[in-house]
Amino acid sequence: MTALVVDRIGLLVTCEPSLGEGGPLGVVRDAALIVEGGRVAAIERAGRADGDQRVDAAGRCVIPGFVDSHTHLVFAGDRAEEFAARMAGAPYEAGGIRTTVAATLAAGEDALRALAAARRAEQLRAGITHTEVKSGYALTVDGEARLCALAAELTDDATFLGAHVVPGGFAGREDDYVALVCGPMLAACRGSVRWIDVFCERGAFDADQSRAVLEAGRDAGLGLRVHANQLGLGPGVRLACSLGAASADHCTYLDGTDLEALAGSDTVATFLPATDFATRQPYPDARRAIDAGVSVALATNTNPGSSYTTSMAFCIALAVRDLRMTVAEALLAATAGGARALRRDDIGRLAPGCRADAVVLDAPSPSHLAYRPGVPLIAATIVGGRVVHGASRAPATDYPGVA
């Protein structure tokens, strides 16, 4: 098998507590990462390994690739005017989704594929080595089937989100739309996706409607995800936990009962701080959730209406500053936490046997992700042992302490 060696790593963050210096980040200093067959084969001392291909980290920090467990990459159009109006004082409302639905339905399949591929390429440049991708911008049987198939071209963690919002043609007949989602729409989409999701929120779907959607998806063999507690306290988080959902996403508003439910379940609370930034919502109290024993993740929520960014580094910086997470907690949430939110153990870590998804930072430590917000620090992105971004240029200078 062809081997890749990422050599002269000043600080290797494995996110595997059993490795290196121990602790949650599993730090190994002066290291080389050995890759065979697309997976991590070993971690050795720097300068002692040979391979068919070599990436010289030159003392830089290497971390696991970011795992973005909540995105909406397949859509047409944008909502820049809506964003500008919101910044001028207009409130965020879930109904704005219908604007993107109209643009997406009007777009051809080739155009949608090209737009989604461009966003995936942007993710790779941002160090996101694995992504979840939702449908939800068609809200018709044929349209959602098309979006799910396009999402599945980008990832094996595609999600059916027919229950994103009730389309205008079903005004006053919300339960009829839920029946459509649970019946013909789910049947048309289930073969392309791993997950089903529902926007359990005022202006979208109530608890009973959300439960019906999730139970139909579960009966069809899909894993469960929930948009929950974004605009206020509500039933979404508790519903997610009671049904064994992998993740409750947003969690902007959490009360004691929500925290107790999350801490007592396997459901991950996925925070989307770029959304709170772009909607001027309060930031979630991640510190309180972590201290309560809740498993957490960070994701970008890339979408045209409330979080048009693919920068996980930006989300980490927000998490450290405004969600009161430590750098280590934020990095773990964006890597191993995202993997847990997708119920995967093959990504989000750099341990032997894991998929060789790694990011070389143009920095000596992961603290720079929050310390230098807005600065492009992704020097190279490696997916399955293949360099997909960067690393072709020679390092300008070695970082201090390089072996």
Image (cartoon, rainbow, N blue to C red):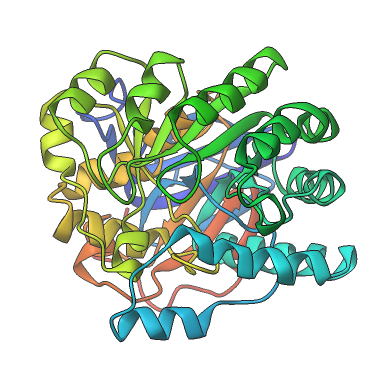
Instruction: Identify which residue is drawn at 50% across, 85% down.
Output: 81
The answer to whether residue 18 is above or below residue 44 is above
* Residue 24 visible in the picture: yes
Query: In percent of the image, x 73 and y 63: which residue is there?
Result: 117
**Image quadrant of residue 132?**
top right
Q: Nearer the viewer, residue 320 or 76?
A: 76
Seen from the viewer's position, the closer of residues 107 and 93 is: 93
Left or right, 84 with reference to 106: left
331 to the left or right of 78: left
Q: How far from the left and from the top, in percent, is residue 378?
A: 45, 65
Which residue is at 21% across, 43% downward?
Answer: 328
Position of 399 relative to 375 (above/below) = above
Residue 387 in the image, given as x and y percentages of width and height: 64, 56
Q: Position of residue 293 (x, y in %)?
A: 18, 23
Looking at this view, is 156 or 162 the one in front?
162
Q: Is residue 284 above or below residue 371?
A: above
How far across and down, in percent of the image, does residue 318 sit? 24, 61
Q: How many marks?
A: 0
Of residue 190 and residue 338, the one placed in the foreground of this image is 190
Q: Picture quarter containing residue 148?
A: top right
Q: Is residue 364 something one can see in this rendering? A: no
- Relative placement, left or right, of 114 versus 272 is right
The quarter in which the N terminus is drawn is: top right
Question: Extreme front residue here?
Answer: 172
